[in-house]
C-alpha cells in the first residue's frame, strides 16, 4: 500500500510522519499493493487540527475525517473508524486480501447500531439555480437540498459542510 501525506496550513514533523506511516502500514493486511492511502492534515483554527484519511483500492474507498486539539490523537481516532468500516462492509468491498478479516481486529470494535429508514418523504424536483437552492435550503432548515440545476440540467445536492460553508454535488447519470 502506498501512503501519501499532504499537509495544508500545518507543519508536518518527522515524528508524526513516522507514526502515521507505521500505523498505516498495519492496514496492508487488508489491501493489495496497488492500494493508495491519502492522509490530509490541516489546521483549521487555533488549536484545532483535522486529519482526513482516504484509502483507495480497486473501485472502492474508505474514508474517515476527525478533528481535535492534537494531531497525534487524530490518528488514534481515525484508524479504528477505518477498520470498523472495512469489517462492517466486508461483503461489499470486493478487493480485500484473502483471509484479511479472519485475524482478530487491530482495534476493539464498539457496538454499532444498524441504521434504518424510519421515514420516507416525497418532494417535487424544482428547476432552479444554485442561489435559489441556497435560499430554499435555509427556508426548510435542512442540512441538504436536492434540485435540478437550470444551468446544467443535472440533479444537484446542496449540503452544509462541517466547517459551516456549503458544498454542491452534481450527479452524472
Image (cartoon, helix red, strand yellow):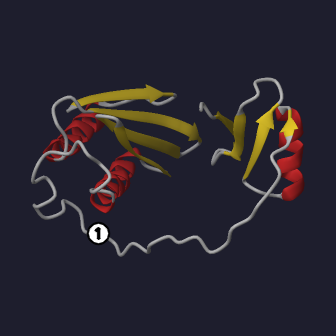
Residue 86 on image: x %, y %: 29, 54
Residue 66 on image: x %, y %: 46, 50
- Pick whichever, 57 or 108, lies toward us: 57
Q: Residue at x 16, y 31 (%)?
A: 33
Whether residue 56 sits left or right of residue 45 in the image: it is left
Is residue 165 something one can see in this rendering? Answer: no
Q: Residue at x 30, y 49 (%)?
A: 93
Image quarter where the C terminus lies is: top right
Is residue 91 something one can see in this rendering? Answer: yes
The quadrant in which residue 119 appears is bottom right
Whether residue 151 sits left or right of residue 67 in the image: it is right
- In the rendered image, the vertical position of residue 51 relative to residue 120, given as above or below: above
- In the rendered image, the vertical position of residue 9 relative to residue 68, given as above or below: above
Mark 1 crowdedness (10 Å alpha carbons): few <14, some 14-19, many ≥20: few
Q: Which residue is mark 1?
A: 109
The quadrant in which residue 122 appears is bottom right
Image quarter where the N terminus lies is: top left
- Pick whichever, 73 or 38, lies toward us: 38
| Count of number-bearing discs | 1
Q: Residue at x 63, y 48 (%)?
A: 162
Whether residue 152 sits left or right of residue 47 in the image: it is right
Amino acid at each position: 500500500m502506498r501512503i501519501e501525506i499532504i499537509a495544508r496550513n500545518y507543519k508536518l514533523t518527522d515524528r508524526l510522519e513516522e507514526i502515521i506511516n507505521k500505523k498505516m502500514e498495519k492496514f496492508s493486511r487488508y489491501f493489495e499493493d496497488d492500494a493508495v492511502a491519502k492522509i490530509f492534515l490541516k489546521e483549521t483554527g487555533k488549536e484545532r487540527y483535522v486529519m482526513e484519511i482516504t484509502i483507495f483500492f480497486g473501485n472502492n474507498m474508505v474514508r474517515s475525517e476527525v478533528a481535535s486539539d492534537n494531531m497525534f490523537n487524530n490518528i488514534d481516532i481515525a484508524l479504528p473508524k477505518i477498520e470498523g468500516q472495512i469489517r462492517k462492509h466486508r461483503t461489499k468491498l470486493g478487493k480485500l486480501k484473502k483471509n484479511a478479516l479472519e485475524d482478530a481486529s487491530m482495534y476493539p470494535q464498539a457496538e454499532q447500531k444498524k441504521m434504518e429508514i424510519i421515514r420516507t418523504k416525497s418532494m417535487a424536483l424544482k428547476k432552479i439555480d444554485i442561489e435559489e437552492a441556497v435560499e430554499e435550503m435555509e427556508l426548510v432548515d435542512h442540512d441538504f437540498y436536492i434540485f435540478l440545476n437550470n444551468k446544467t440540467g443535472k440533479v444537484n445536492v446542496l449540503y452544509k459542510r462541517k466547517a459551516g460553508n456549503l458544498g454542491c454535488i452534481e450527479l452524472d447519470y
